[in-house]
Amino acid sequence: MAKAPVLPPAGEPGVFLSQAPAAIEEGEWLEGMDFVGQTVTGNDLAGVELSGCRFVRCRLTGCGFAAATFRDVLFQDCDLSRCRFTRASLTRCAFEDCKALGADFSGAGLRDVSFSRCRLDLTNCNAAALRDAAFRDCSMEETALSGCRVKGLTLERCALTRVNFFQTPLAGVDLTSCTLTEPVFSASAGEVRGAVMDLFQAAQLARRFGVIIKE
């Protein structure tokens, strides 16, 4: 189960657009800051390091966070569409009521990270390391989750439409509360070995692989 971010009761008000580049240049962390109602579009903030920060109602679209570090960070009601978190490290982070359409988490490390009530359509998580990561009440249409290293993955009440699970083991993952529509697996569907499904989900998957089910 993903651990919640450890945050101060109230952070210091900050201006992300000016403080993040300065912190990168100085090689310093941004710590204990609250960023509220701010807009940053298309900025390259690769390598930024944040700890104990909140982003509330922010629009951070198309920004580059490659190889960045996020520790104990909360994103609440934010738009992170098309942001690039490639090879980033996220630990004890929470995304609540966020939109991250087409965001790129490929090769990122997510440990104790939760996504709640988020739109993650077309999000790329290929080759990510997901340890105690949780997705709850999320829209995940054509989300890419191929080649992921998984330990303690939670998927609850998510709309999984044409999600690519190619070469991502789902052993022990309970999918029964999710809607599973046209998922992408390898030819042998070895990814679902040990996954927990209800009868309807299992029957749908069996039919896709040519199994004839007698009523």
Image: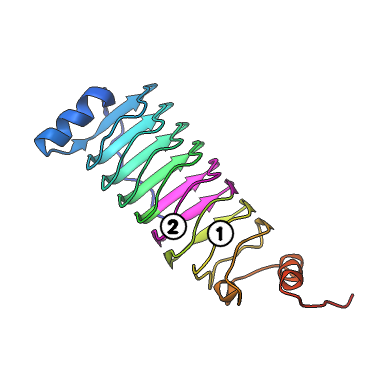
> In this view, which residue lies farthest toward the left?
26
Query: Is residue 210 depicted above or below 53 in this figure?
Result: below
Q: Is residue 101 left or right of residue 189?
A: left
Disc ID at residue 126: 2
What residue is shown at x 36% (from left), y 22% (from top)? Answer: 38
How would you rate the neighbour count of disc 1 (Cα within 10 Å): few for under 14, some for 14-19, many for 20 or more? Answer: many
How far is the residue under mark 2 from the one under mark 1? Answer: 9 Å
The region drawn magenta spans 113-141
Name the residue that disc number 1 marks: 164
Which is nearer the N-term, disc 2 or disc 1? 2
Circle 2: element type = loop
Quarter of the rendering containing residue 132: bottom left
Q: Is residue 159 left or right of residue 15?
A: right
- Residue 178 at x, y = what percent? 65, 56
Q: Is residue 212 visible?
A: yes
What residue is shown at x 34% (from left), y 54% (from top)? Answer: 108
**Most foreground residue, 48 or 107:** 107
Whether the residues at callouts 2 and 1 have beta carbons within 8 Å, the answer is yes
